[in-house]
Image: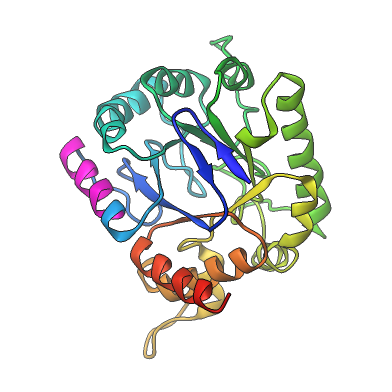
Amino acid sequence: MIWQTTRFPIALSRPQVMGIVNITPDSFSDGGSHPDTRSALAHCEQLLKDGADILDLGAESTRPGAVQVPVVQELDRLLPVLREVLKLGVPVSIDTYKPRVMKAALDLGADIVNDIWALRWQDTADPLDGRAVVAGHPSCGVCLMHMHGEPRTMQVSPMEGDVLPAVSTFLANAAQDLRTRGVAQERIVLDPGIGFGKTVAQNFSLLARQGELLGLGYALLAGWSRKSSLGAVAGPRPGSVGPAGQHERMAPSIAAALLAVERGAAIVRVHDVRATVQALQVLAAIK
């Protein structure tokens, strides 16, 4: 199986590691760590040295409670970094839900659109539609994610009951919508949306039953890195109270990535690239 993208057919014969590059002041884990083009580019170069296969650039936080950023501001953050990162010779993904940002990034040569809204969001003042942007491109890759609600309120009123049927149906419909618009199956990847409008128990249910989503016929991306559900089950360091903090979640994140791969995920989206790559090498050795 391959994931067809703008410049690269990405072979999924082994798990692909997507390194997270947050060009934001307020992302839940590393917001503000890369405030300018030079530092963001240096971070990208380090992720590649650590073994990342794909770089995922995001210029707006979509953490629980996040407030929407204007299109102009998102583009001002993203485009200078994107222009430089495209020179590194690796697949570049853009983490955005805004059609205008998608189009600008794809026009520059970005390889993948990674959208938490699965191309559903539309600016009421702008007729551009994300599905039309992706369908109008000859070969870009796209990742369609399931989200219940929207970032500001999704964890205030999460889903209820057994989430897998709802997630599966949503993703199947989103993918089929693109197929009817002429987007080839090999361009589409699906993401169950860990932490996006789900409870801790529901997130782990999705992991336990992730293999059922493979029946939809698309490659799967798993995004567990440093999520609060991992902190909830891992617990704090000795002597502290409450859930494990964001920077205490590397080991649980690696465990979740390995479990996701064992259950069929083709791509894992992570902050801690080197440690994840090493863990995947151990997994590969026993196979």
Classify residue 169 as left or right of residue 99.
right
Q: Which residues are magenta?
A: 37-47
- Residue 88 vs residue 79, the one in the foreground: 88
Dominant secondary-structure state across the stretch colored magenta? helix
Q: Is residue 212 above or below residue 96?
A: below
Is 255 positioned to the left or the right of 78 in the image? right
**Outermost residue, bottom side:** 238
The answer to whether residue 114 is visible is yes
Quarter of image, res 278: bottom left
| Residue 209 drawn at (x, y percent) | 75, 64
Residue sitting nearer the eye, 278 or 243:
278
Q: Residue furthest left?
A: 38
At horizontal 81% and vertical 43% (from top left) the residue drawn is 169
Q: Is residue 239 magenta?
A: no
Colour convention of the picture: rainbow
Q: Can you give x and y, in whole percent of width and height, for residue 155 in the image?
A: 61, 53
The reply, left or right, for residue 32 in relation to residue 16 is left
- Above or below residue 104? Residue 18 is below
Q: Residue at x 61, y 40 (%)?
A: 150
User: What's the residue at 68%, 28% (across, down)?
Assistant: 184
